Amino acid sequence: MQTILHENPSPGMNTHGQPIGTAVPGWTPRAQPPRTPMKGTRCDVVILDPAAHIDDLWEAFSADPSGRSWTYLFVDLPASKEALRAYLDAQSKLTDPLCHTIIERASGRAVGIASFMRIDVNMGVIEVGNINYSERLKRTAIATEAMYLMMKRVFDELGYRRYEWKCDSLNHPSRKAAERYGYIYEGTFRQAVVYKGRNRDTAWFSIIDKEWPALKRAYETWLDPANFDASGNQRRGLAELIAEAKR
């Protein structure tokens, strides 16, 4: 069969008349995330330093001895400070995941951890994961600012095209958080992982670069001190601001 070539293909079509993806002119691999601090107004996000952060993190994570916050992580709550130190020491030696500690500026104390992971510099794709918010961090503006600072690094500083969030499909708080932060649900990968002797169907969410400018405006409006009353209560919700910014 003779192949007919189109001399002047339409946009999104190749010379064979087949639909193809949009051009990405001048694309080059992105850089690895640097180890420099991400500084905010309520928190800083810094490279994990077990020696400097162990006391704060042990105190913060021990505030919930039930270990409930560790259910959907790949490890359970360490039984002692020494066990937590060993876990953090192992994490600190890795470059992917690249583990960070969230430092509350007002107190200077470490209150949680989060990592850049599955870093693909050639495709410009990176995931945020291994997120563990202590009781001191949950449901605070600090938690939201930490996620904003990491997004800002990925898109503004490094120029990645895609930022991912993945979680156990049964982890409803994580799914709800992803949606609040502006991630788009893409689907569930069935039987994707075995961990802790059980199955995990993995829910996938993402933000892509063209969505970031609107999200950035929403985050900055939400984080503005003017958005909070004297008691620290938000005047407008992040989801509302994101929906408005996307119009």
Image (spheres, rainbow, N blue to C red):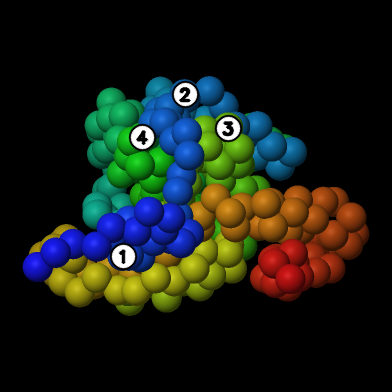
Instruction: Tell me, yes or no, whether the two marked residues, 4 and 2, touch with CB atoms within 8 Å.
Output: no
Q: Secondary structure at mark 4?
A: loop
Residue type (three-letter) at the residue carrying disc 3: Glu
- Dot 1 or dot 2: first in sequence order is 1
Label 1 secondary element = loop
Looking at the picture, tell me which residue is in the foreground, 4 or 201. Answer: 4
Q: Which residue is mark 4?
A: 121
The residue tagged 3 is: 157
Secondary structure category for the residue under label 2: loop
Number of on-image labels: 4
The label number, if any, that marks residue 35 in the structure image: 2
Label ID, residue 18: 1
- Residue at image position (74%, 71%) is 247
Tell me if I can see residue 71 in this picture.
no
Answer above or below: position of 68 versus 99: below
Real-space Cα distance between discs 3 and 4?
13 Å
Say which residue appears at 16% left-offset and 71% top-offset: 191
Cα distance in 3D space between marks 1 and 3: 36 Å
At x 45%, y 48%, the residue is 23
Q: Measured from the top left, where is residue 195 in percent x and y?
A: 16, 61
Q: Amino acid at mark 4?
A: Val
Q: Residues within 10 Å of mark 4 (few under 14, many from 20)?
A: some
Front position among marks 2 and 3? 3
CA separation, marks 1 and 2? 43 Å
The crowd level at tag 3 (other Cα within 10 Å; few <14, some 14-19, many 20+) is few
Q: Secondary structure at mark 3?
A: helix
Q: Quadrant of residue 157?
A: top right
Which one is in front, 39 or 215?
215
Amino acid carrying mark 1 in the image: Gln
Return the x and y of residue 112 as percentages of the image width and height: 49, 45
